[in-house]
Amino acid sequence: MKTDSRMSRVLHALIHMKHADGPLTSEALGEMLCTNAVVVRRLFSGLRDIGYVTSEKGHGGGWVLAESLENITLLDVYRAVGEPSLFSHLVSADHPECLVEQAVNAHLAATLLEAESVLLKEFEKVTIAMLAGEVGTSALRSKSARVANRSRSSAN
């Protein structure tokens, strides 16, 4: 089963954006995230809708933070990317008629619902600034600038 990496990708991008010298294009962010610009625009649409990022069109444009990372929590990002299932890969639906599978899934579903509630409460306590503080800022600034400059050069 394919895992959903939207949340980690957005977190990754937001922290790079904090250390960028200016707007980052969808192409530059895509390079950082090993994906394409269309995926970046789709990922960031939820953040733009709630006012955490803005996009500027045209030469020199790109994505910029509209809100301080101190004011954005993991829960905010989780909601902005569409509240992806946190534990769906743990429950099987291969044999829905099987009584054993039904019993296992009922117990797992109840336990996972409780675990998800606890996890979401923890998400609410962690700001993106806390995560960014755990990253070496000089190396990050250097990488963000390198990728942004490379993207701007190729656009010209």
Image: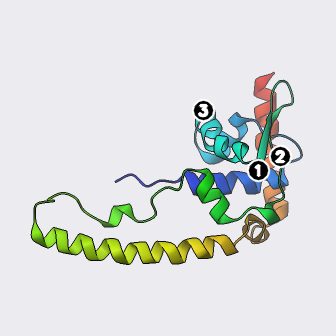
Mark 2 and 1 residues: CB-CB less than 8 Å, in contact?
A: no
Where's the C terminus, which quadrant?
A: top right
Q: Residue 78 occupies which quadrant of the picture?
A: bottom right
Element type at mark 3 = helix
Which of pointers 1 and 3 indicates the residue nearer the eye? 1
Q: Residue at x 80, y 44 (%)?
A: 146
First in residue order: circle 2 vs circle 1 = 1
Kindly identify which residue carries mark 1.
52
Q: Which residue is more in the foreground, 61 or 110?
A: 110
Q: In the image, is residue 137 above or below residue 80?
A: below
Q: Residues within 10 Å of mark 3 (few under 14, many from 20)?
A: few
User: In the image, residue 71 lies at what x, y percent?
Assistant: 80, 63
From the viewer's perspective, is 131 left or right of 100? right
**Amino acid type shown at disc 1:** Tyr
Q: Residues within 10 Å of mark 1 (few under 14, many from 20)?
A: many
The scheme the figure's colours follow is rainbow
From the viewer's perspective, is 10 left or right of 62? left
User: In the image, residue 112 lies at what x, y percent?
Assistant: 39, 73
Q: Which residue is more in the foreground, 124 or 17?
A: 124
Kindly identify which residue carries mark 3.
38
Kindly identify which residue carries mark 2.
145
